[in-house]
Image (tube, grey):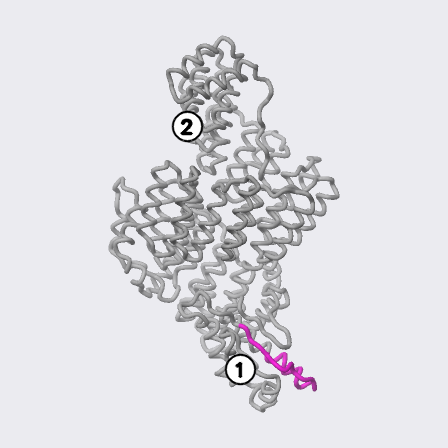
Amino acid sequence: MHFGRPKVSGNGRHSLFAEEALQETIRSCKNDVVLDQVLLNFGSKLSGSDDYTFLFRELGNRGEWLAAMRCFEFAVSRERKRNEQGKLASSMISILGRSGKVDLAVKVFENAVNDGYGNTVYVYSALISAYAKSGYCNEAIRVFETMKDSGLKPNLVTYNALIDACGKGGADFKRASEFFDDMLKNGVQPDRITFNSLLAVCSGAGLWETARGLFNEMVYRGIDQDIYTYNTFLGAACNGGQVDVAFDIMSEMHAKNILPNQVTYSTVIRGCAKAGRLDRALSLFNEMKCAGITLDRVSYNTLLAIYASLGKFEEALNVSKEMEGMGIKKDVVTYNALLDGFGKQGMYTKVKQLFAEMKAEKLSPNLLTYSTLISVYLKGGLYEDAVEVYKEFKKQGLRADVVFYSKLIDALCKKGLVEYSSLLLNEMTKEGIQPNVVTYNSIINAFGESASNDCGSDNIVSTISQSKSEEDNIIKIFEQLASQKSASGKKTTALKQDLLCISGVFRKMHELQIKPNVVTFSAILNACSRCSSFDEASLLLKELRLFDNQVYGVAHGLLMGQREGVWVQALSLFNEVKQMDSSTASAFYNALTDMLWHFGQKEGAQFVVLEGKRSEVWENTWSTSCLDLHLMSSGAACAMVHAWLLSIRTIVFGGHELPKMLSILTGWGKHSKVTGDGALKRAIEGLLSSIGAPFQVAKCNIGRFISTGAVVTAWLRESGTLEVLVLQDDTSHLGKGLQRLTL
């Protein structure tokens, strides 16, 4: 629950007879008859619920769930006091919940209620906690409501479990805070676990400012912070893109004599990796060793995941070997990282080999394993393999969650199979799983992409959506894709239908009170950039009003060329954006600039990119000798080229010499079908040609344009150069657009 808290081995209140009984039950747990006899033999010696709880827990820790359940049933049948039976039930439910055996926990709960000993706050709280630990937020809340309807008053454990459920079930902070407010209203005072759980919700959502407020309130209430508090707080900082703040928090820990542990370092290392500061992440591993902190399984898995995400598989496999050399066997997390890394590189044979190896090691694939595999196969067009993995997933009795569905939807969207992803969206809501903002972002971002939408192109789509059969619709979708692989190539550009789809998605988000984030706004701005007319873009922009007038006001104002009246508001928005991680911030700047550039607001686009440069949204953007554009979108890069050339023109006319060699870097276009032929490179090549800039592709680096300082100086001194470098806004479309945008 709290980022690596060690399990409590026991309460020390069980008797020696309980330990003897445990050894006998372990030896006989595969034989029900012998097990029953062992329990009868020890029945008179075992002292109540403490001894039996010890048996349940130890058998459960060994994976002997059927034997644990048999012991529980035996204990309940022997016990005559209702309150003691209730204690046994709550213990059994808690043990099952900690191990993810929710279905068994529900069975115990239902039997307890039906037999008259389960109507206690402890039994209900135990089931809420069991659901929470598996991330089933809605189910936990339903139990909570049933509990209140039964006349039971929630206690501290109940509320803590509910807040924990919000964190693990993907609910937003608003929902968790409602339970916190209800808790205070009913006179239940929060403790350290309450705040740790609230911080965990913030951590998962990247709500850094909210997390900081909670931490300060914790201090104000006089509740001491422990290592778990700080580790969770660090998680919120790192997930909110505040890596530098995370280092300050670590310094504060030292000042309070709270020594960082493996979890602390792993959290900050993951934050550095997410922010692209991989050198700093790797140096933290050395710092751990210098501090005498032995790398544990989590640390090794984090290091391995960094190398795998970079495509450095030799290093990743070496880390795996080092783990085993330290006596730490590869676990499910290790394999998940390797599967994801190899899958992203399209190394499907290796993925299959690793999955087979994982099962040969008797490791049970978890929800993330299956969602990763299915996502990898979908993105690779290996639909038959996706079908088989999904069928195996269903056979294992695992239950899909919001992350599982979101990964599948994202994979389909990236293949341009948007209509199929919409069917999955309906499927998950039918299963009672509420989509989150990540789910919707994938769909919004996919709509309107050029030549990448098959919306309404397949009869099977309407057939599946109208089907009322018991058969799993996901299997139907995958099997249809497997039988018609050409579907991924069958695209139509029905933009007006796309606009209706996006509008529908936004309104559904509004209806479910799912608040968009910066990624959502970037997606909608990207969709505007792909619109063929200003009128179509205006329809999309109006949807922003449902959620955020500030974003709408800035986008609308800049698009209309109203910089003087809107720039203060824009700077306020940009200040909020730059507090986020660099990839999210740069994506927003890229999307906004692309939209402005696409509709002829080129001077406005340049204002935005220069503000992005000032805020260091793109690292190492330019020097006198080099302009690095590889992290920028085409529109942002074009605007930046003009700004850079104007900058070095001031150097020339100031009487100074330019460096001997000038470079413009666009990257290799590694995601393009032809290496070195990326969209960014083509855009810059076309721009340089249109303005007559004397740059050529370097022979040794096809993603680099070069020229000598002397040649560029001569060109900048030509009489017509300044005119082509100074950007002007195109206002020909604004009259009709203004009317539509302000309706």
Residue 413 on image: x %, y %: 39, 56
Q: Hey, what amino acid is under mark 2?
A: Leu
User: Residue at (67%, 51%) from the top-left corner?
Assistant: 247
Please report the bounds of the magenta region as a residue range.
645-665
- Residue ID for mark 2: 104
Q: Hey, what amino acid is under mark 1?
A: Phe
Q: Tell me: 439 left or right of 564.
A: left
User: Residue at (63%, 80%) from the top-left corner?
Assistant: 648
Residue 664 on image: x %, y %: 55, 75
Quarter the N terminus occupies: top right
Q: Residue furthest bottom?
A: 719
Q: Tell me: 33 left or right of 26.
A: left
Q: Which mark is residue 592?
A: none
Q: Nearer the viewer, mark 2 or mark 1?
A: 1
Q: Which mark is residue 695?
A: 1
Q: Residue furthest front?
A: 325
Q: CA distance from mark 2 to mark 1?
A: 69 Å
Judging depth in this view, the residue of 396 and 225 nearest the camera is: 396
- Image quadrant in which you'd find residue 101: top left
Give the answer, above or below, for where 716 lies relative to 559.
below
Sequence-first disc among 2 and 1: 2
Residue 501 on image: x %, y %: 37, 57
Q: Secondary structure at mark 1?
A: loop
Q: Secondary structure at mark 2?
A: helix
Q: Are marks 2 and 1 in contact (CB under 8 Å)?
A: no
Residue 646 part of the magenta-drawn span: yes
Quarter the C terminus occupies: bottom left
User: Residue at (67%, 49%) from the top-left corner?
Assistant: 287
Judging depth in this view, the residue of 552 and 517 nearest the camera is: 517
Give the answer, above or below, for where 110 lies relative to 609.
above
